[in-house]
Image (cartoon, rainbow, N blue to C red):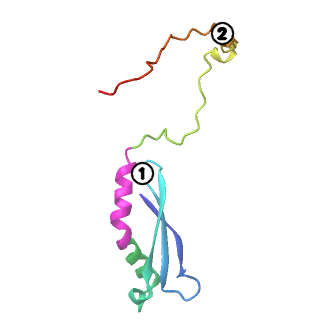
C-alpha cells in the first residue's frame, strides 16, 4: 500500500481552525482513493508537520483500512481499457423492423356492456 500526502494546508484559509490533511492511497492491486480530515489547531500546538500528518492518519486509519479491505480483492481488470476480439459479427446488419399502421376499425375490442343499475355487494 502506498500513501501520498495530497493536501496539507491551514483550513479554512480565512480564520483557520485546523490543518486539512489529505492522503491519496494506492492499494497493492493498483486501486486508489482519497481521504482527508481536519486536525484542530489545538491538537497541532507544539507538533511538527510530520506529527500533524500522523494525527490525521490516526483519525482516518479505520476509514482507510475499511476502504482498502473493500477494494483489495477487486479484479485488476476493473478500469482496464479493453478491446473486444473481432468475431466478425460487427459486419452483420441488425434486423430491420417495419412499422405497421392499422386503422382503429381493424382492432378487435371485446364487447363490454355495463348494466344500467349496477349493484354494490
Give the residue at x 40% y 81%: 51
Q: Quadrant of the C terminus?
A: top left
Q: 105 above or below 73? A: above
Residue 65 on the magenta segment: yes
Mark 1 neighbour class, 10 Å CA radius: few under 14, some 14 to 19, many 20 or more: few
Residue 105: assigned label: 2
* Quadrant in the rendering for residue 65: bottom left
Residue 56 on the magenta segment: no
Magenta segment's dominant SS is helix
| SS at mark 2 in the image | helix
Foreground of the two, 113 or 13: 113
Q: 60 above or below 102? A: below
Give the residue at x 66% y 18%: 90
Mark 2 neighbour class, 10 Å CA radius: few under 14, some 14 to 19, many 20 or more: few
Which residue corresponds to mark 1? 28
- Please state the extent of the stretch shown in magenta in the rendering: 58-73
Q: Nearer the viewer, mark 2 or mark 1?
A: 2
Q: How many numbered badges does the structure rendering display?
A: 2
| SS at mark 1 in the image | loop
Amino acid at each position: 500500500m502506498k500513501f501520498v500526502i495530497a493536501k496539507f494546508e491551514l483550513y479554512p484559509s480565512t480564520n483557520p481552525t485546523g490543518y486539512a490533511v489529505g492522503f491519496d492511497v494506492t492499494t497493492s492491486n493498483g486501486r486508489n482513493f482519497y481521504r482527508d480530515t481536519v486536525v484542530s489547531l489545538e491538537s497541532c500546538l507544539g507538533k511538527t508537520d510530520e506529527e500533524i500528518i500522523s494525527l490525521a492518519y490516526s483519525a482516518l486509519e479505520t476509514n482507510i483500512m475499511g476502504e482498502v479491505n473493500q477494494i483489495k480483492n477487486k479484479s485488476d481488470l476493473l478500469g482496464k481499457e479493453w478491446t473486444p476480439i473481432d468475431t466478425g459479427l460487427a459486419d452483420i446488419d441488425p434486423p430491420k423492423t417495419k412499422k405497421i399502421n392499422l386503422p382503429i376499425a381493424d382492432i378487435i375490442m371485446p364487447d363490454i356492456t355495463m348494466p344500467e343499475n349496477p349493484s354494490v355487494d
